[in-house]
Amino acid sequence: MRILIAEDDANLTDALKRSLRDAGYAVDCVTTGLEADRAVAGGGFDLLILDLGLPKMGGLEVLRRMRARQEPVPVLILTALDGVDDRVRGLDLGADDYLAKPFALGELEARVRALTRRGHAGSSNVLRHGDLTYDRVGKVAQIHGKTIELSAREMGLLEILLPRAGRIVSKEQLLDHLCEWGEEVSTNAIEVYVHRLRKKLESGGIEIVTVRGLGYSLAKPKSA
């Protein structure tokens, strides 16, 4: 999962970034509304954390432009404790949730989990694929009820491939969802991550198929 933070308070941004990265998310940051508008328009994000008091373009205008373009990205707005009117306007413009400053990082993480789950409307928190189960909230993968240890990258791959089982996902799509701006991650590295995840899923008969020149596909269970 890839998150964009649009916040001009450097200390708050650093705290959010550390917390979300520790939780396994890829995180990019911008400090102005103009940068936020351009970044979201470029695609690739699963959630926007949006401060309303951004310079160069206010958060409400960023939100208005997003929804006018029919951008489906969930939005969590950050606002001052007494900014009731702004919170109401934000929700009316299409924000999905809000947090009033100051807030606890634990609460923000919980809201992020809820919003990213909402992005998979109608889906269960636990994904099942043959003998594999994956809890998107607890970030736990199990085969035959036994937990398998996954790195953050491997977990990210699984989160992308599972909802798209049977469909081809390109290396470029994987890079877009897994990597932050400025990260020197090559398509060769994606091959390594896929290889490692494939080995860990073998015991459950779960197969990641390489489609030469196109990408990867999580094969449907043979019993399906």
Image (tube, rainbow, N blue to C red):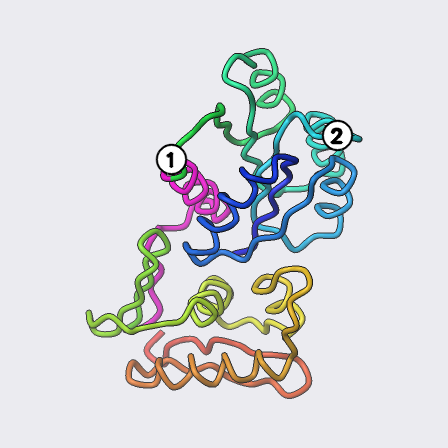
Q: Give me the disc on residue 61.
A: none
Which quadrant holds the C terminus? Answer: bottom left
Residue 15 drawn above or below residue 54: below
Q: Which amino acid type is shown beneath numbered disc 1?
A: Glu
Rendered residue at 76%/43% (across/down): 35
Please provide percent x and percent y for residue 148: 28, 73
Residue at the left extreme of this rendering: 145
Q: Give me the disc on residue 107.
A: 1
Secondary-structure class at tag 2: loop
* In this view, the mark in front (1 or 2): 2
Q: Which residues are magenta?
A: 106-130
Residue 79 drawn above or below residue 141: above
Rendered residue at 73%/37% (across/down): 32
Residue at mark 1 to residue at mark 2: CA–CA distance: 26 Å
Rendered residue at 44%/46% (across/down): 117
CA neighbours of label 2 inside 10 A, class few (<14), some (14 to 19), many (20+): few
Q: Is 21 left or right of 144, judged from the image as shown? A: right
Please provide percent x and percent y for residue 119: 51, 46
Q: Nearer the viewer, residue 36 or 133?
A: 36
Rendered residue at 68%/31% (across/down): 63
Secondary-structure class at tag 1: helix
Residue 74 drawn above or below residue 151: above
Q: Nearer the viewer, residue 17 or 75?
A: 17
Q: Which amino acid type is shown beneath numbered disc 2?
A: Pro
Q: Is residue 198 magenta?
A: no
Nearest to N terminus: mark 1 or mark 2: 2
Q: Nearer the viewer, residue 83 or 67?
A: 83
Determine whether label 1 and label 2 are within 8 Å by CB: no
Residue position marked by numbered label 2 in the rendering: 55
Numbered-mark total: 2
